[in-house]
Image: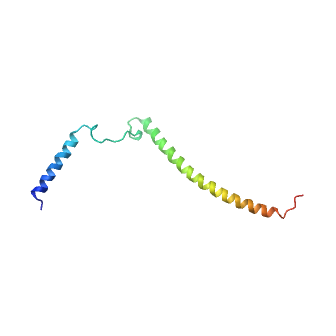
């Protein structure tokens, strides 16, 4: 099923992984310094609030642009309709 070469390769890989785990965490690739992973409550709270604010800002900008475009389109057509109606109305 498994050859001696396969087992030798696995033993070598396990030894390399064990050496990697023995190293201090600073030399290994560690987690990034994110505020949301902080042990300080206020840092975590403001990090969450900041992410929430930025997400809402981006979503608001997108919806704002869509509604401005719709408003301009409907406003222009409404103005044309209103001018057409008012053409037949006498001014005095």
Residue 48 lies left or right of residue 5; in this view the side is: right
Q: Going 81% across and 61% down the picture, which residue do you hit?
A: 86
Question: What x and y, as percent, mark residue 6?
Answer: 13, 56
Left/right of residue 56 with respect to residue 35 in the rendered view: right
- Expressed as whole percent of the image width and height from the top left, the position of residue 23 reads 22, 38
Given residues 46 and 81, the one toward you in this image is 81
Q: Nearer the viewer, residue 8 or 40?
A: 8
Residue positioned 15% across, 53% down in the render: 9
Write down the quadrant of residue 88 in the picture: bottom right
Q: Which quarter of the figure is the N terminus placed in?
A: bottom left
- Return the x and y of residue 80 as percentages of the image width and height: 74, 61
The C terminus appears in which quarter of the rendering? bottom right
Q: How is the image coloured?
A: rainbow
Residue lying at 50% horizontally and 45% vertically, measured from the top left: 54
Count how many numbered circles sit on residues in the image.
Answer: 0
The residue at the point 43 percent across, 36 percent down is: 43
Residue 36, quarter of picture: top left
Where residue 25 appears, x then y in whole percent? 27, 38
Q: Residue furthest left?
A: 4
């Amino acid at each position: 099923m498994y050859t001696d070469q396969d087992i030798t390769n696995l033993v070598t890989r396990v030894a390399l992984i064990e050496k990697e785990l023995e190293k201090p965490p600073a030399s290994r690739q560690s987690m990034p310094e994110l505020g949301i992973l902080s042990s300080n409550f206020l840092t975590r709270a403001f990090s969450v609030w900041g992410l929430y604010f930025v997400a809402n800002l981006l979503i608001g900008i997108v919806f704002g642009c869509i509604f401005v475009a719709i408003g301009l389109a409907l406003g222009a057509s409404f103005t044309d309709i209103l001018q057409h109606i008012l053409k037949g109305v006498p001014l005095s």
